[in-house]
Image (tube, rainbow, N blue to C red):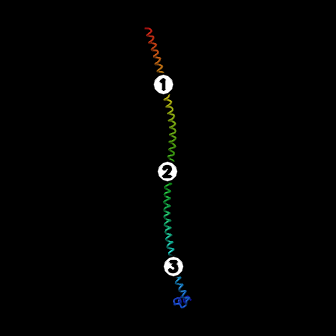
Amino acid sequence: KVKTKRVEKLRPSTNKKEDTDEKKEPNLNHVRQETMAKETQVRTVLAEHQRRVREESERLAHVEIELRKLSAQEQADIGILRTQLEDIDRKLHWLQKDFNAKESAYKKSKEALDAMETRKRSMHEHLALMVLSSEKRKEEKLNELLANIDSKS
């Protein structure tokens, strides 16, 4: 039967039903070709879209790697600065302690200096009073001696 049908298809049909079937078959082939063409077009568009997505994904991965490098470098820089700040903080603490000790020593020394200067001034004043008093006594004694000499002569 299969062979017969093939032979019948090759012969021109005399039946209207057969004519319609033959018209449907080329129409079906045309639809299949259109469908296949659309599938090919969709696959091409999909492949292009996938290629662009893959390229974008690679570009984003590269950007992410660069950001990680920057972040790592930034973290390293921050670590270095923290270490330097801690070192400076230790030095400042020592310097502040040294300054406080020296300031305290300065104040004690200044007080001792001021006290010594006050004592020296006081002693100068006392010396001046002693010299003045001594000079007055001498002058009185000399006047007394002169008066004795004048009275005996």
Pointer 3 local density, CA inside 10 Å: few below 14, some 14–19, many at least 20? few
Residue 121, position as x, y percentages in the image:
48, 27
Seen as rendered, the residue at the extreme bottom is 14
Q: Is tag 1's residue or tag 2's residue first in the polypeptide sequence? A: 2
Give whichever of 128, 73 is nearer the camera. Answer: 128
**Could you tell me which secondary element the residue under label 2 belongs to?**
helix
Give whichever of 81, 28 is nearer the camera. Answer: 28
Residue 84, position as x, y percentages in the image:
49, 48
Q: In the rendered view of the protein, which quadrant contains the C terminus?
A: top left
Look at 49% across and 50% down and name the residue there. 81
Cα–Cα span, label 3 and label 2:
69 Å
Q: Which residue is mark 1?
A: 125
Q: Is tag 1's residue or tag 3's residue first in the polypeptide sequence? A: 3
Residue 48, position as x, y percentages in the image:
49, 71
Relative to 101, does residue 42 appear above or below in the rendering?
A: below
Q: Which residue is mark 2?
A: 81
Mark 1 belongs to which amino acid?
A: Glu
Residue 141, position as x, y percentages in the image:
46, 15
Seen as rendered, the residue at the extreme top is 153
Look at 48% across and 24% down and name the residue there. 125
Q: Which residue is mark 3?
A: 34
Q: Nearer the viewer, mark 1 or mark 2?
A: 1
Give whichever of 71, 121 is nearer the camera. Answer: 121
Cα–Cα span, label 1 and label 2:
63 Å
Cα–Cα span, label 1 and label 3:
129 Å
Q: Are marks 1 and 2 in contact (CB under 8 Å)?
A: no
